[in-house]
Image (tube, rainbow, N blue to C red):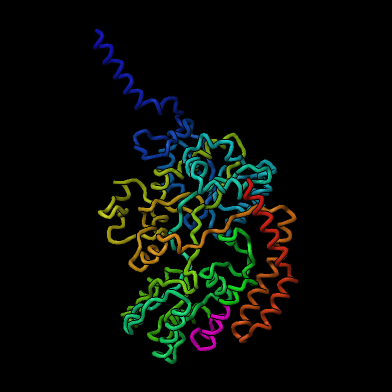
Amino acid sequence: MKKLLCLLMAITMILALFTGCSENLSENSPYNPDIKAGDTGGLKMPISKTGEEITWSVTSAEGNLNDSYVVKKIREITGVNVKLDVYPASVAMEKINVLIAGGQIPDIIGQGLEQSLADDLCTQGAFAAVEDYIDKLPNFKKTFVDNKDNNWIFKSYAAPDEKLYGFYGYDYNRDINTQATMYRKDIFDKHGLKMWNSPEEFYQTLKKLKELYPSSTPYTTKSGDGVFGAWSTSWGMVAHTPYYDEEEKIWKFTDVDPAYKEMLDFMKKLYKEGLIDPEFITNTQPAWTTKMTQPDKAFVTTDWIGRMEMFKEQTKDTVPDYDLRFANPMGPKGTMKEPQQVCWARYVANNEKAETAFKLLDFCLSPFGKELITMGIEGETYTLGEDGMADYIEFPDTVPAITELEAKYGMFVEGMYLSFDRRSSYFQFSEREQEAQEFAKDKSKLEPIDPILVFTEEEKEVKNRILADFEKAGKEFATKYVLNDLGDKEWNDWLKKAENLGYKELVKVYNDAQKRFDVK
């Protein structure tokens, strides 16, 4: 009899495990207990047993996302009746601002709000504070509270009442996915040229290319006056704005820094010797593309790394050996910007559904959530290849672009994703792109992200006023300095002008804010 009772009790307990989570589900609940959810990071499913409706504003060119695979699965896994409000990128923020002005705030705002507007709305009580729910959000807590490298967001993004309202994502960027220096490997190989590792080696390489191809301009770009910002990173600075000196632990102003003058002098030298395209400030994209895709007109450039594959495809018939590759930065530090992996804030309306909305976001930040939003479910939308990367079942012969996956499944929707699974198509690189990613594995080659400071209203006024004047004046001076062969006299005149424009006051504002940041 005792054995029978024990058996009955065991059966009861097993049944409870399978049915407990579906107990008390309302008939309106979309929850499907037959779907085996992966690792939700400790967040218990279903999130809702009543089928609460959560409105969520996102940005996409796709119009039928509410019927998409991903949204349907999120409903069935979480029990939340998700309703997406989808806006094209061109009007998304305008639409959100209209809704906010009319008091019709979605339960979740997926678009990134400008910080000052978000702070104002938080002060008015429009949004719920994520801090009030952290103990119920295991994935957010693990990412931003327990991880000491990321808990700076509680200082940098706090609202005026010193509470954090935004729900941030993390790990959504490639390690290198920005502007980079690239070179024509086919030309370098042809002439036995080696990769440079210093400004002098960069200069000597361009000089050799000019000797080999006298009618060429070895370096070109379409960055316009943005080229000064692109180059300044590998000199350890950020052009036209204050930058944080990691060694001295203070903020400095780039455009008056002696190292910045060294960069401009170096650029001027290359320009005078015909090693830089004389139209590098005024190049249009078509003009730049034409120069870069001819056999022997330009060999080094600065642009988005996706150009490597685009130009290879574009020249397959005209220059079959064309091979644009990732190159070392040309500056003395040889560094690139560290990618920002903290994804912008989603805001949750301050209403009775706030906890459900926050938990829904926490699900999207979980290992299974990011898998679903970027890959789907194994066996349904993807299988894992021998390399451990996702093979998308309905794209058997190709690596689909994220736009294709968005159209097919509702994956990678801007405003919905909070993290990317690194097995997804977004991290499946060509040989050329992989070389760029390898560069970032050496963290000493990345310039650390400057601290994100919180300014007082008075400091914001000073900062905004002076920076607006400086960006225009700084770009104008740098352009004239290089193109017109200016020297020490003009540099000293510029230093006086910069002082009159208030750079010392600006740097003081940053350093005062840094002191407060350091003691928090």
Say which residue appears at 42% left-offset and 82% top-offset: 205
In this rendering, the answer to whether 187 lies above or below 308 is below
Whether residue 107 can be seen here: yes
Which residue lies at the image location 31% right of the left edge and 16% below the top edge?
9
The magenta span reads: 263-282
93, 453: nearer the viewer: 453
Is 267 part of what is drawn in magenta?
Answer: yes
Residue most toward the top? 1
Q: Position of residue 185 (x, y in %)?
A: 35, 77
Residue 317 in view: no
Q: Is residue 478 above or below residue 422?
A: below
Identify which residue is drawn at 60% across, 76% down: 261
Image quadrant where residue 504 sits: bottom right
Residue 455 location, x and y as percent? 68, 53
| Residue ranking furthest to the front | 248
> Residue 2 in the image: x percent, y percent?
26, 9
Look at 69% across and 79% down and name the residue there: 492
Residue in the foreground of this view, choosing between 475 and 14: 475
Quadrant, the C terminus: top right
| Above or below: residue 61 compared with residue 417 | below
Q: Name the side, left or right, on which 518 lies relative to 342.
A: right
Considering depth in this image, is 85 or 391 the residue closer to the camera? Answer: 391
